[in-house]
Image (cartoon, rainbow, N blue to C red):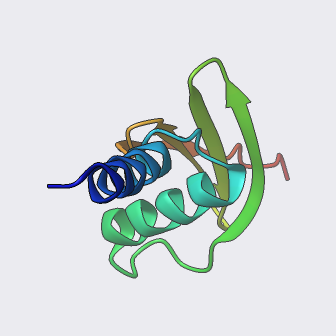
Amino acid sequence: MTAPSRGLSILVIGMALAGCIAPMTAREARDIAHERLDKYCRSGCGALTWNNTQKLKKRWLVDFDSQRQKYTVIVENDGNATVTVWEKGVPAP
C-alpha cells in the first residue's frame, strides 16, 4: 500500500468513526423515542402527541401525552431507550 492510499484510508476510517461517536441531537433522540414508543404501544396507546425533549447529563428525556397517560422515554447516548408510563390524574367532578 502506498503512502497516499494509506493516508486516504485512514482519513475515511476516521470520518466514519467520528460520525459514530458524535453527540446525539434532540431530533435523533426524539426519533429514537418515537420508534421505541411505537414498539411499546403497538397501537394500544391511542393518539400520542410529542410534548417536550430535554437533555439531562448523558441522556435525553422525551415526553409524549395521550388522553389518559403521559409517556416518558429515556434515550441513552448509545441509542438504548426505556419507556415509563404515568397515569394522569382524574379531575374531580
Residue 1 visible in the shown view? yes
Q: Residue at x 55, y 41 (%)?
A: 22
**Which residue occupies the foreground of this view, 56 or 28?**
28
Which x, y percent locates residue 79? 39, 46
Residue 29's place in the image compared with 41, above or below, is above
Specify the farthest residue to the left: 1
Specify the farthest residue to the top: 57
Residue 4's place in the image compared with 74, above or below, is below
Specify the farthest residue to the front: 2
Screen quadrant of the N terminus? bottom left
Residue 83 visible in the shown view? no
Is 42 on the left or on the right of 51, as rendered?
Answer: left
Which x, y percent locates residue 16? 39, 54
Which x, y percent locates residue 4? 35, 55
Q: Residue at x 70, y 50 (%)?
A: 26
For the image shown, how many numbered marks are present on the structure? 0
Residue 9's place in the image compared with 38, above or below, is above
Is 59 on the left or on the right of 16, as rendered?
Answer: right
Q: Residue at x 41, y 72 (%)?
A: 38
Q: Residue at x 75, y 37 (%)?
A: 54
Is 43 on the left or on the right of 57, as rendered?
Answer: left
Q: What is the quadrant of residue 57 in the picture?
A: top right
**Which residue occupies the foreground of this view, 45 or 22?**
22
**Which residue occupies the foreground of this view, 67 or 73?**
73
**Which residue occupies the foreground of this view, 68 or 34?**
34
Q: What is the quadrant of residue 82 in the picture?
A: top left
Which x, y percent locates residue 78? 38, 38
